[in-house]
Image (tube, rainbow, N blue to C red):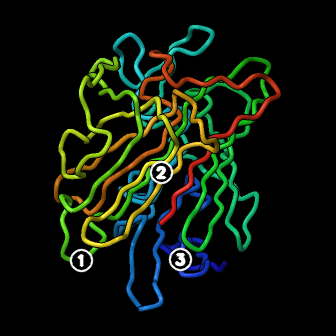
Amino acid sequence: MDEIEYLGSRILRWQVGASTFLAWPEAGARLMNWNITYPDGTFRDIITWPELNDASEVIKARGGNPILFPFSARTFDQGNINYWRDPKGKQRPMPMHGIARQSPFEITRADETGFAARMIPDSNAHEAYPFQYDFEVIYRFESKAFTVELRLKNNDKVSIPWSAGNHFYFNLPWVDGTERRDYTISIPASKACKHAADGRLFPVDSFKKTDSVANPELVDRIHYELTQPVVSCYCSMDDSKLEIEVGADNDPDPGYAVVTWTQSDASPFFCIESWMGPPNSPENEVGLHRVSPGKTEAFSSTVKV
C-alpha cells in the first residue's frame, strides 16, 4: 500500500498480485478503480473511474463504488420525493442514495489487505438519520477479487432501520472490439420490479434470468428474492467474466436485490448493484432491515474475475 496525489489530496493505492486498487477512504469510503495487468501484458479495467477536474466532483462521479446508506435509491413519504418517515412518525429529508457518499469518513484501518473507514455524521446527516450509530465500510483486497462489507452498529436505545447497498460501476465492454450485445448477464432472481415515480414498486411479470446486457429493459430493473447469491456477467467472445456474490451466505436474504443500470447506450460502464433491498424500503418495507439496540448487522458483497 502506498499514497499518491490526486486532485490536491491523498488517495491510497494497493498492488495485490496482478491487481491494482485505488481508494479514497476519507471521501465517502470510495473505492475508485480496480484494474488487472495479466502476465501477457494485457490490461483490464474492471471498476472504472472517470476523469475529473476538481475534488468537489467526486461525490457525484459516475465511477468506482459509491456507498448507498442508509437507504438505496430514492425514498418517498406519501408521494413526497426525497423524504422518509422515521419510526417516531416524523418526516425527514433523505438525499438520493442516502448520506454516505457525501459524508466524511475516518480511516480505522489501512494495511496491505485493504482498509476500514467509519462515517462521521454531520448535522445534515443527523437530521436525515437521527440515531446513535457507527457505520463502517470495510474493504478486503485479493489478487483477483475484493469484498466490501457495510457494517452498522446500533448505539441507540431504539431499533434502527436500514437498507444499504453498493453501486458498482463496471467497465463494459471490457474486451477490445466488442459491444454490449456480446455480453450476457445471469441473475438468479425469482422476482423483478421497477420503481414508480411515486415511490411504489410495480412487478415485472416476465423477465429472463439470463439476458443480453444490451437489452434496454435491464435499465433500472430491480431483481430480488435470489435463489442463490452469485450474479455473473461474461463475454461471448472469450472466456472472461465477472461475478458478484451478494451476501455472505449460500441462501441469500429474500429481500436482497440486484439492480442493473446504465446512463445510456454509449456509456463506458454498466452498473450491477448489490443492495439489501429494493428502493424506498422505509415505505414499501421490502428489504427493510432493523438493527436492535446494542447489536451490529453487516452486508457483504464480493466481486471476482
Residue 264 position in % (x across, y down) = 19, 51
10 Å crowding of disc 1: few (<14), some (14-19), many (20+): few
Three-letter amino acid code at the position of disc 3: Thr
Q: Is residue 186 above or below residue 18?
A: above
Three-letter amino acid code at the position of disc 2: Pro
Residue in front for this viewpoint, 220 or 124: 220
Chain-order first, disc 2 or disc 1: 2
Tell me if 281 is positioned left or right of 220 in this view. right
The reply to whether callout 3 and callout 1 are in contact (CB within 8 Å) is no
According to the picture, the residue beneath numbered tag 1 turns out to be 176
Residue 14 position in % (x across, y down) = 61, 76
Residue in front for this viewpoint, 18 or 10: 18
Residue 35 position in % (x across, y down) = 46, 74
Chain-order first, disc 2 or disc 3: 3
For image coordinates 58% across by 75% down, the residue present is 13
Q: Is residue 41 above or below residue 157?
A: below
10 Å crowding of disc 3: few (<14), some (14-19), many (20+): many
Question: What is the distance, in whole Å, between disc 2 and disc 1 at their CAs?
Answer: 27 Å
Question: What is the distance, in whole Å, between disc 2 and disc 3 at their CAs?
Answer: 18 Å
Which numbered tag is attached to residue 20? 3
User: Which element carries disc 2, helix, strand or loop?
Assistant: loop
Which numbered tag is attached to residue 35? none
According to the picture, the residue beneath numbered tag 2 turns out to be 66
User: Which element carries disc 1, helix, strand or loop?
Assistant: loop
Q: Is residue 14 above or below residue 235?
A: below
For image coordinates 46% across by 83% down, the residue present is 37
User: Which residue appears farthest toward the bottom when viewing the image?
Assistant: 40
User: Which element carries disc 3, helix, strand or loop?
Assistant: strand
Q: Quadrant of residue 202?
A: top left
